Amino acid sequence: MLKRLFTLLAMLATLVLPLGTAYAEGTPDALVRRISVDVIDTAKTDKAIQAGDLNRILALVEEKVMPYVNFEVVTRSAVGPQWRGASAEQRTKLQTEFKTLLVRVYAGALSELGDQKVEITRTQPVPGSSQVVVQSEVRGKGEPIKLDYRLDKAGESWKIIDVNVGGLWLVQNYRTQFAQEIGRGGIDGLINTLVERNKNAGKS
């Protein structure tokens, strides 16, 4: 289930295609479209990416996708109430390790993508907040799969703060996992677990 989730999550970076609608500059729709076009254009001309070079894919994701993710909000939401009791040093470590984990998730899924396409279907505001949800569908073989992105304003820019695949929000999914780790070993236990995951991923 998680592998399927991560594979679909990577669609954000590669395959979001407009339905022919004009997108105003500075809108969430425009951000998603700009990221996808930038990544696609790079991937088409980069022989290392076409050959499946994971390090090059990691660099592409870091450069083209991650600047548009609000990692403080994402990490705070994933950690949950225990974030308030974390020290500044612990918060920095959590953000660093969680970012490394997500970059590898994007990159690994990116290397496995096939002929699927994602089409934006709707953008709607989240009542009572400055957030919006950009709704889309993954279309390929079989039934379409819903793929939605939650974005919020960070200053004058839109930032991605969560992704929903088939009814499952990514941050909420990690929040459940993180709560179990925190329950066993506190914030430091969660940090150590993330460090180990990233070390092991780097060896593969």
Image (cartoon, rainbow, N blue to C red):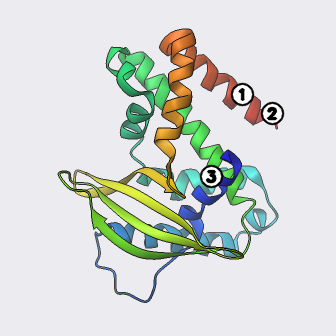
Q: Please name which of the two marks, 1 or 3, marks the residue nearer to the observer.
A: 3
Judge the density around disc 3: few (<14), some (14-19), many (≥20) Cα neighbours within 10 Å.
some
**Which residue appears at 20% of the width and 51% of the height?**
129
**Which residue appears at 66% of the width and 50% of the height?**
58
Q: Secondary structure at mark 2?
A: helix
Figure quadrant of the C terminus: top right
- In this view, the residue farthest toward the left is 128
The alpha-carbon separation of the residues under discs 3 and 2 comes to: 23 Å
What residue is pinned by disc 1? 199
The alpha-carbon separation of the residues under discs 1 and 2 comes to: 7 Å
Position of 197 with respect to 175 (left or right) is right
- In this view, the residue farthest toward the bottom is 20
Q: Are marks 1 and 2 in contact (CB under 8 Å)?
A: yes
Q: Percent from the top left, x then y, of residue 64?
A: 52, 59
Q: Percent from the top left, x then y, of residue 6?
A: 63, 51
Q: Secondary structure at mark 1?
A: helix
Work out whether residue 180 or residue 111 is closer to the camera in this orientation and state it: 180
Instruction: Decide: is 178 above or below 124.
Output: above
Q: Secondary structure at mark 3?
A: helix
Q: Percent from the top left, x then y, of residue 189?
A: 57, 13
Position of 71 with respect to 5 (left or right) is left
What residue is pinned by disc 3? 5
